[in-house]
Image (cartoon, rainbow, N blue to C red):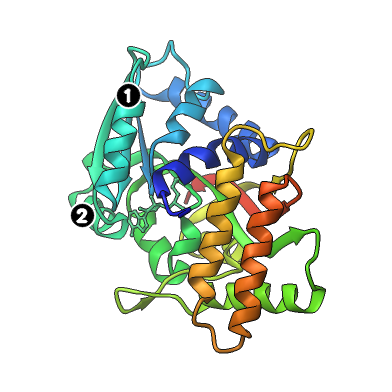
Amino acid sequence: MHSDFTRYLTAKRTVDDRALNRVVWAQLAEAVRARQTALTHPLRVLEIGAGVGTMVERLLAWRLFDADATGVHYTLLDANPTLLASAQTRLTHLPWWLQLEFAPADALDYAARATATGPAQQCDLLIANAFLDLLDLHTALPRLRGVLADAGLFYFTINFDGATLLEPAIDPAFDAAIEAAYHRTMDERITDGHPSGDSRTGRHLFTELPAAGFEIRSAGSSDWVVHPVGGAYPADEAYFLHFIVATMEGALRHDPTLDQPRFAAWIAARHAQIERGELVYIAHQLDFCGIAR
Ligand SMILES: C[S@@+](CC[C@H](N)C(=O)[O-])C[C@H]1O[C@@H](n2cnc3c(N)ncnc32)[C@H](O)[C@@H]1O
């Protein structure tokens, strides 16, 4: 019922807009301007796990790029071609200096190919929003480092970091058991036979990024905080919340550590809280930007 991923990613836009860390953003903006000034070719941007393209819209609205510089070539990469098709439909009326490319591919395969091809395939700015927590950092980051040119910039944002808070409480002990079980599903997730992501990705990036050649210049929290305003959720954020609750249901539907009838009632109660404009949802996350070394 609440399983339209395209609508979820679109609804997430306003939630991310509020959450993205403004200190990290300011540091990125300064570094991008400096790099654009120094370049004689268009700034090459690669966004991995780009989804329906909301980050491009944001970067334009927030004026990240210098329109007077040598232009921007922006590649949106995602493993899901349906999402990229939706991005292509959304992203019209672009400024003349922005050229888009759509790459339906696995990020790590693409990185391996770019690394093998050398500088011609590398980028000046690598972006990943709500994406790195789906990967096994230890194996993925060194591969992703290969797509960045020397002294290239990175902007890795909305990295989940170990707290899913839902208020008001239904039953504090059961609420806590569900949160722990939900995080465990992230820690134990296997994709294509390999470990993929964990529930404390944000804090792990402080060691994993430098170890892979990404020097952190700025970091800060980017918690999602979704709450009703005047009794209603802004934009399409009620859908965003229903999707999150449905995701928890899907992840834990067969979890043997939870009393399943009680869990089903808990899920129904959370959806009802959203319908009544009562639910507050907070997810702790971290943003990073810096330079490749
Ligand atoms: C949580 S969504 C975030 C999408 C977008 N960055 C946003 O914030 O709206 C994660 C995205 O990563 C994509 N994805 C997952 N694994 C991938 C992989 N190995 N390579 C490329 N894309 C991948 C999914 O298709 C999805 O669009």
Can residue 259 be seen at all in this image of the molecule?
A: yes
Q: CA distance from mark 1 to mark 2?
A: 21 Å
Q: At 59% across and 82% down in the image, what residue appears?
A: 260
User: According to the image, label 1 marks what residue?
Assistant: 42
Q: Nearer the N terminus, badge 1 or badge 2?
A: 1
Residue 47 higher or lower than 284, as above or below:
above
Q: Quadrant of residue 16?
A: top right
Q: At 57% across and 78% down in the image, what residue appears?
A: 184
Q: Quadrant of the N terminus?
A: bottom left
The three-letter code of the residue at mark 2 reads Arg
Of residue 43 and residue 268, the one placed in the foreground of this image is 268
Q: At 55% across and 32% down in the image, what residue appears?
A: 31
Q: At 27% across and 56% down in the image, what residue appears?
A: 106
Q: Position of residue 245 (x, y in %)?
A: 58, 60
Judge left or right: residue 102 versus residue 266. left
User: According to the image, label 2 marks what residue?
Assistant: 113
Of residue 249 and residue 20, the one placed in the foreground of this image is 249
> Is disc 1 placed on a helix, strand or loop?
loop
Residue 263 higher or lower than 124, as above or below:
below
Q: Position of residue 243 (x, y in %)?
A: 53, 53
Q: Position of residue 85 (x, y in %)?
A: 26, 37
